Image: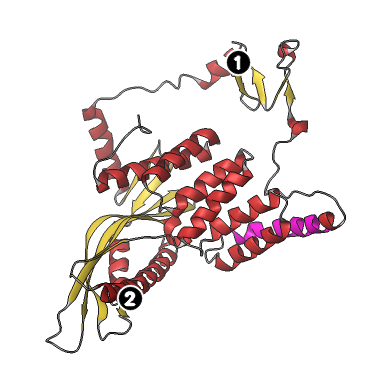
């Protein structure tokens, strides 16, 4: 049903894309790569401007050994923003596996240069070393492939004795369960003794009154935070801090309109939704930003008789990944009618404003990760 939804408004489309991407990321973590690919493909169909959707789909494709398709997704992500370190990293992995180690090294080096948060850089040295070895192999006439991690190869094929003689004795990575169904080789079928020891994990329905009571108890005992999933992660909300920091850093930004005396300045920031929160578990902290806001801008000159030009920059569902990747694409609108040439000049100035907002959001994320 989710794949077939046809949103009729922009807000409905944004909400659908967000849900598709969240489910896709969950499928990636669960290693359900075909479903992850389908979810990200659907997200791209509804919004092809999200760099993260292409990167994530490429990750799923790489896990399935479809490197050429993953390379195409990496190129699509870089067409949106060529300063995304993850896209360059993915491109390098694909080129390595497609027998182009020299180009792969170039991509890895660019990824390292752009990786301001240090998430990708630690992974690069062994990949570059292997790529250099692959270059030497190619020079000597050998065919070399570099992989970011060991991929399944022919030697990994699992033979299931119960299938002998049925024409399916070699089935990559799969085995037959007691009921005759096929499943992953790594799936463990619980014994009766294990089931008895584990107990009953069947979910139990609770009434709305019981749910409200549990929520109230959590709020009373945890204060600013709340426990999630059976006291595994504590969620500490930081919406106010995120909004205050974003407002403080963005409010003073400005950009000059080329060839004109107008200067674009931030007039107001509103339309707030979401913010940030910290997930804490046994001293491990995850800092998560998911915020929406609208920047209202006005362009004026020193001459009071000149008409002011006004407009908006809408930032919807901005997340950590988009901030780190530099893939934030606000909806920019100019509400004052302008001639074509003037309009293009204002678009240039607003592009500068977009870059400055991106830089300030990176600074907010950096400071956010120093909290607590």
Q: Nearer the viewer, residue 172 or 270?
A: 172
Give the image quarter of residue 197.
Answer: top right
Which residue is drawn at the image coordinates 29% and 76% (left, top)? 341
Label 1 packing within 10 angstroms: few (<14), some (14-19), many (20+): few
Helix, strand or loop at mark 2:
helix
- Magenta includes 128? yes
Give the x, y percent position of residue 227: 36, 42
129 with respect to 228 (left or right): right
Magenta stretch, residue numbers: 119-136
- When the figure is inspected, residue 301 is found, relative to residue 333, above or below; the finding is below
Residue to which mark 1 is pinned: 191
Question: Which residue is painted at 49% across and 38% down in the image?
Answer: 36
Disc 1 on helix, strand or loop? loop
Q: Are marks 2 and 1 in contact (CB under 8 Å)?
A: no
- Outermost residue on the bottom side: it is 303
Q: In which quadrant is the N terminus drawn?
A: top left
Query: Is 3 drawn above or below residue 87 in the view shown?
Result: above
Residue 101 horizontal/vertical position (percent): 72, 57
Give how far across and how far down residue 129 sits, in percent.
75, 59
Residue at the location (70% across, 56% down)? 127
Image quarter for residue 336?
A: bottom left
Q: Residue at x 27, y 43 (%)?
A: 12
């Amino acid at each position: 049903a989710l794949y077939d939804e046809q949103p009729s408004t922009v807000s409905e489309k944004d909400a659908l894309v967000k849900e598709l991407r969240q489910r896709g990321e969950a499928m990636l973590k669960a290693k359900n790569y075909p479903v992850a690919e389908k979810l990200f493909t659907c997200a791209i169909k509804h919004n092809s401007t999200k760099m993260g959707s292409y990167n994530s789909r490429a990750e799923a494709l790489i896990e399935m050994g479809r490197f050429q398709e993953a390379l195409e997704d990496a190129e699509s992500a870089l067409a949106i923003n060529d300063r995304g370190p993850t896209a360059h990293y993915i491109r390098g992995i694909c080129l390595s596996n497609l027998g182009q180690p020299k180009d792969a090294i170039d991509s890895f080096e660019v990824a390292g240069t752009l990786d301001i948060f240090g998430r990708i850089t630690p992974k690069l040295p062994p990949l570059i070393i292997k790529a250099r070895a692959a270059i030497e192999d190619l020079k000597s006439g050998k065919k070399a492939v570099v992989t970011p991690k060991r991929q399944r190869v022919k030697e990994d094929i699992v033979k299931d004795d119960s299938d002998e003689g049925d024409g399916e004795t070699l089935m990559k990575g799969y085995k037959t369960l007691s009921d005759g169904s096929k499943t992953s080789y790594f799936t463990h079928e619980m014994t009766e003794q294990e089931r008895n020891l584990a107990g009953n994990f069947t979910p139990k329905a609770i009434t709305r009154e019981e749910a409200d009571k549990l929520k109230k108890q959590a709020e009373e005992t945890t204060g600013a935070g709340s426990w999630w999933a059976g006291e595994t992660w504590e969620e500490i909300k930081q919406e106010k801090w995120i909004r205050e920091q974003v407002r403080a850093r963005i409010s003073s930004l400005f950009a000059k309109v080329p060839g004109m005396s107008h200067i674009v300045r931030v007039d107001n920031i509103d339309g707030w939704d979401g913010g940030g929160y910290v997930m804490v578990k046994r001293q491990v902290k995850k800092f998560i930003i998911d915020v929406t806001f609208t920047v209202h801008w006005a362009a004026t000159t020193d001459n009071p008789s000149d008409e002011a030009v006004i407009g908006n920059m809408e930032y919807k569902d901005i997340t950590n990944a988009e901030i780190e990747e530099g893939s934030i694409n606000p909806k920019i609108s100019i509400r004052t009618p302008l001639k074509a040439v003037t309009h293009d000049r204002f678009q240039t100035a607003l592009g500068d404003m977009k870059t400055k907002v991106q830089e300030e959001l990176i600074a907010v994320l950096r400071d956010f990760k120093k909290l607590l």
